[in-house]
Amino acid sequence: MTSFRTLAIENPTQLLFGVSPRPVTTRSGMRIGGGLVYPELNFTLPTMLVTEQTMPEVLRHYTEIVTEATRRAAELEAPGLLLEFEALPPMTENPDWGMDVVHVLLDGIEKGESKYGLKAALRVTPNDTREMIRPPRMRSGALYENMLALFERSAAAGADLLSIESVGGKEVHDEALVSGDLELAIFGLCVMGVRDMRFLWTEITGIARRHGVHPAGDTACGFANTAMVMAEQRLIPRVFAAVIRAVSAVRSLVAYECGAVGPGKDCGYENVFLKAITGCPMAMEGKTASCAHLSPVGNVSAAMADTWSNESVQNVKLLGGMAPICSLETLIYDCRLMNEAIADGPEAARTLRDWMVRSDARFDPQALILTPASAVRVARAIVVAPNPYRAGIAAAREAIAILSDAAAQGACKISDREAVWFDRMTDTLDDLPSDEDAFIERTMAQVDRSTFVAEDYLLAERANA
Amino acid sequence: MTELDNLTEAIVRGDRKEAVRLTQERIDAGDEPKNILAALVKGMDIVGDKFQRQEAWVPEMLIASRAMSQSLALLEPLLVAAGIKPEFTAVVGTVEGDLHDIGKNLVAMMWRGANFHVIDLGTNVPSDKFVEAAREHNADVVGLSALLTTTMPAMKATIEKFREANLPNTKVVIGGAPITMEFAREIGADGFAPDAASAVGLVRELVGKA
Ligand code: B1M
């Protein structure tokens, strides 16, 4: 396991879209993070069941998407196209079905390459189906085996990148979000989450190594994006969601400690911190993912993107054409603009980046926490901490400092109703023990243990204590 | 301010200890259980209104709702003895194949806060289980949540099961990010709520009318 003790990118001015210190090259020759931002298209099914009977119809959708996407990407002369197959749960539970889709997509990519000379690559993202039973079994059982089988078989078939939206620790984190409990959130992300990530990503990187493909990265979607969507619905304070985002980086970082190389998964907005720490390229999404969910970080999230994604859109007809193709077109134009700025030199690229940053950062604390300057501060706090638990506390403290300073200076819109949460969160952090063991002891005594299997998190002894 | 007003206030503040203390005090003083209950429900209504006006966050709602539940636990035996039942009985769950549960949890929380008796079946719930639970608990309302386009058909299947099961007094309401009123109509649901807060009014309107 690699332990990141220093930053790969120390200076915020060096945190830029399209460029990362450790580019990733796909089989078709796309050099992600090597000076170009590539469009990453994600897509899903319209309202329909996925069953054995509907699989022919399912495959028709994916065939149509890949055929049209490669054609449109070639027409618009995209320098490359990354497709993400984010599986739907029945496709992971039945890896044969998942593989049928993988083959359709790889076949489409190959045809696109031979027909148009288009460089293209496939990211496969099996579902974390381990939680189909509750409490989830994280390290054994048929669900777990099938999930790994889809990874293994996709890698063997030629998928370039492997990713997942893993959920270890979510069992308690959901409760932390609805009750605004930062202590429990740190337990979910930095104790349970980190332990599960170490286990899972050791498996995934092993599979990737066996087949010579890239273990790309994970996301704290079920944690920090749940918080963001809840904040967007005004259910929880945005400052709380912003702090959760910073803490979530500690969990997602573990994939890279285990050998992931990027590009990190698109919906992990915490990728900005991870890019500073690891130097790996990152997928990001923002305004062009509004088809999947709304967000307050539409532009700022592009500032450090190496691939630019739409997150997900159903294959339904819009006036312009099928929705994934409309999404792709927007992504390609977004990328063209960023790539033109890169071609004009670092100063030009930074000007565009700074516009993207400034146009969002003053409106929402969740945007402010993603700026290059914030990213480096939070990232540094994480790497100097002695362990993931203390890194979680350090990330939270740094995020609170950034946000409260900005609020005091009027640099970011934060209402009084939200600002009271700075003290509330700081009080929580002040009350935490500095020793991880003491923290685990204390939290295990309070947490609802019926929601998770302690032994799957190597917490069984604490559960019996 | 009467003592019952103080109880209402304690719920609004989410002051669990004080709410429980005042509830016990009113029980000991021989107040009518239904009046104590009304004071608790009034507290939750005030928090619910604040929430709808965006003056309260979910964590505050939750604290108030926990204060309410603990106070209610003291009152329960007296309510049962007096034959006073919760306003409605509701079964709620996320449909088969779907694991998204925060939205559903919020609906359950709002319903509990409004003094509905709520049976939460969790996530990934097969349609038969909804029907069984509705029958077993004599539910006034069943709430289905779905977040995936590929699990929306499970809502339709569940509603069909309810029609087959012939439970005319059970209304089925649905919600979740991809759900629309149009979809609800199309699959024959009795109602749709765009968010958790409006799910309370929806049930009061639907079942209250029945
Ligand atoms: C009974 O009456 C009612 C009345 C009102 C009701 C109601 C019932 N139920 C809800 N409401 C309403 O009231 C609530 C409060 O006001 C509202 O509830 P919501 O649930 O809408 O709002 C919550 C308070 C906050 N919202 C959320 O928590 C959902 C946010 C998004 C980003 C989301 C999250 C966070 C998650 N996800 Co998921 N997820 C997305 C979501 C994007 C979106 N647009 O919604 C969506 C729904 N997910 C999606 C996907 C693809 C997936 N997810 C998955 C997993 C997850 C996480 C576990 C990581 C996490 C869930 C966390 C949790 N505890 O539930 C997987 C599926 C797992 C499964 N079997 O269900 C997975 C397949 C991803 C994967 N790679 O594995 C997409 C759906 C695509 C599709 N085909 O439909 C998606 C739109 C995001 C995207 N990619 O664009 C209202 O809708």
Image: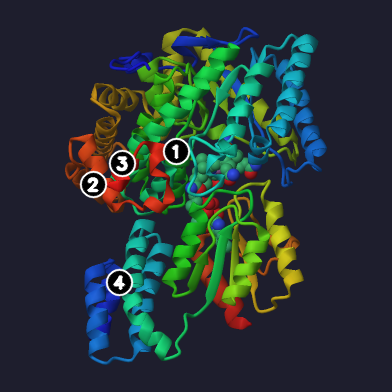
**Tell me, what colour scheme is on the image?**
rainbow
Q: Which residue is mark 3?
A: A461
Instruction: Give residue A434's position: percent from left, percent from top.
Output: 18, 36
Chain of the residue on which disc 2 is drawn: A
Q: Are marks 4 and 2 on the same chain?
A: no
The amino acid at mark 1 is Gly
Q: Are marks 1 and 4 on the same chain?
A: no
Instruction: Give residue B135's position: percent from left, percent from top.
Output: 63, 74
Instruction: Give residue B131's position: percent from left, percent from top.
Output: 65, 67
Give the structural element (helix, strand or loop) at label 2: helix
The amino acid at mark 3 is Glu
Looking at the image, do the residues carrying marks 3 and 1 touch, with CB atoms under 8 Å apart? no
Chain of the residue on which disc 4 is drawn: B
Give the structural element (helix, strand or loop) at label 4: helix
The amino acid at mark 2 is Arg
> Does mark 3 have its CB less than 8 Å from ligand 1?
no
A372 displayed left or right of A168: left
Q: Residues within 10 Å of mark 4 (few under 14, many from 20)?
A: many
Note whether A437 is above or below A36 in the view shown: below
Viewer-nearest of discs 3 and 1: 3
Q: Which residue is mark 4?
A: B11
Q: Residues within 10 Å of mark 1 (few under 14, many from 20)?
A: many
Instruction: Give residue A238's position: percent from left, percent from top.
Output: 37, 45
| Residue at the (27%, 30%) spot, across then down | A391
The amino acid at mark 4 is Ile
Q: Which circle's residue, 1 or 2, is located before the other in the chain? A: 1
Query: Which quarter of the picture shows residue B47?
Result: bottom left
Q: Which residue is mark 2?
A: A442
Viewer-nearest of discs 3 and 2: 3
The answer for how far apart the CA atoms under marks 1 and 4 are is 34 Å
| Residue at the (54%, 21%) spot, across then down | A307
Q: Which residue is mark 1?
A: A168
